[in-house]
Amino acid sequence: MKILMTADTLGGVWTYCLELTKALAPHGVEVVLATMGRRPSSQQKDEAARLPNLRLYESEFKLEWMDEPWQDVDQAGQWLLDLERREQPDIIHLNGYSHGAQPWQAPVLVVGHSCLLSWWQAVKGEAAPEKDFVEYHRRVRLGLHAAQLVAAPTCAMLRALCNHYGTLPHAAVVANGRDSRLFKPGTKSPMLFTASRLWDESKNIDLLRRVELRLPWPLHVAGDESGPDGRGRAATMQHRLGRLNETQLADWLGRASIFVLPARYEPFGLSVLEAALSGCALVLGDIDSLHEGWGDAAVYVPPDDPDELLLTVTALAQDSNSIERLGAAARERGLQLNLERMADGYMALYRRLQRDRTSPCRDCLSLPPRSLRPPTAVGSRPRTGHRAAARSPVPVASRGSESGPNGDGSESGGRA
């Protein structure tokens, strides 16, 4: 089987694409990866070259969430159609939305990793101004509804897509995975750690900055400090590490006792998964997607309450037993979000698309917006010492004929 897959090189979607390509190799899948946003770095090219079942096509066309992107998006669409004619893939796997509406010959899967409208709602606390997002909304809606199948890494993300762009009758949830061999617990130190796109308001790093000098332990911060356009510079913090490669990130996470990410918006959170695999106790933003993924294997703080963040982290730092227990629970759950499970989920979707190239998958789970309920009831979020009832991780692939729950890109560690 050959897959034509799109990726941007600016965030966690790049890591997701490479991990999925690696996981698909035992299934005999060849991936043709077409990149946009900016040219891959030399490090990214080296990462891609290590995967024998991947061939890389590069471009620097703007992505649909960038400023004034539509001329580039249209040109990228023609480039992708040319690639399809050249490569003759069995499946089109788009990690963006607009190009789902193109006249593809192969069946199309669109995977939603994030979107501007749900980002704005979560970060700004209000609907995005319609006049500024008319074309974005139109293009994303067309792409989603033209695809034979839509997937997302969490029910929360899939619900957001349905809420903003209309019910998607043929959709599924496939959780992201990470190679657990890359991230392992080391000798833990009295240290806090966070890794993210520091310039992205949704990661809420400013809340950490506001309490940094009162935290009980040093806070080390990894990630890009400015966005792809050079704007959105992160607030200055004391222990900045910059952008880390995978080996460096694994080393820091292995030594960190507590990983803190008080995010307002995090459709999945590869950095959280990496921290969990490293045995870190997780302190996360009190949002549905993170509850869905981590349940009682983490503690949660309101994204708008610096005092609660400080209280939670301070109490946890003084309780070594809770740190050890939470770190073990996080790793146990993280190990379930593995590459094999992710590959099995996507292979199931690819085979469904192959079985019916002329109409949508009839047996995929329909996910109407109102049918989702948060994994933990709003208003009863657990804090340190108060754990919610255990829940299984998000399913690798949701499918069936019955009604069920409905739900940029999440970034990976300090590289995004």
Image (cartoon, grey):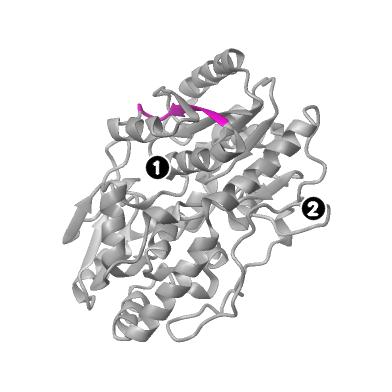
Whether residue 299 is visible: no
Amino acid beneath label 1 = Gly
- The residue beneath circle 2 is 400
* Viewer-proximal residue among 382 and 57: 57
Residue 97: x and y in percent read 58, 35
Q: Is residue 161 left or right of residue 65?
A: right
Query: Is-magenta flag for residue 83?
Result: no
Residue 117: x and y in percent read 54, 46
Amino acid beneath label 2 = Gly
Whether residue 98 is visible: yes
Classify 56 as above or below 43.
Answer: above
- Depth-wise, is mark 1 or mark 2 nearer the camera? 2
Classify 276 as above or below 224.
Answer: below
Gap between marks 1 and 2, in whole Å? Answer: 32 Å
Q: Few, some or many C-alpha atoms within 10 Å of disc 2 (few <14, some 14-19, many ≥20)?
A: few
Q: Magenta span: helix, strand or loop, mainly?
A: strand
Q: Residue at x 59, y 33 (%)?
A: 29
Q: Residue at x 46, y 39 (%)?
A: 18
- The residue beneath circle 1 is 11
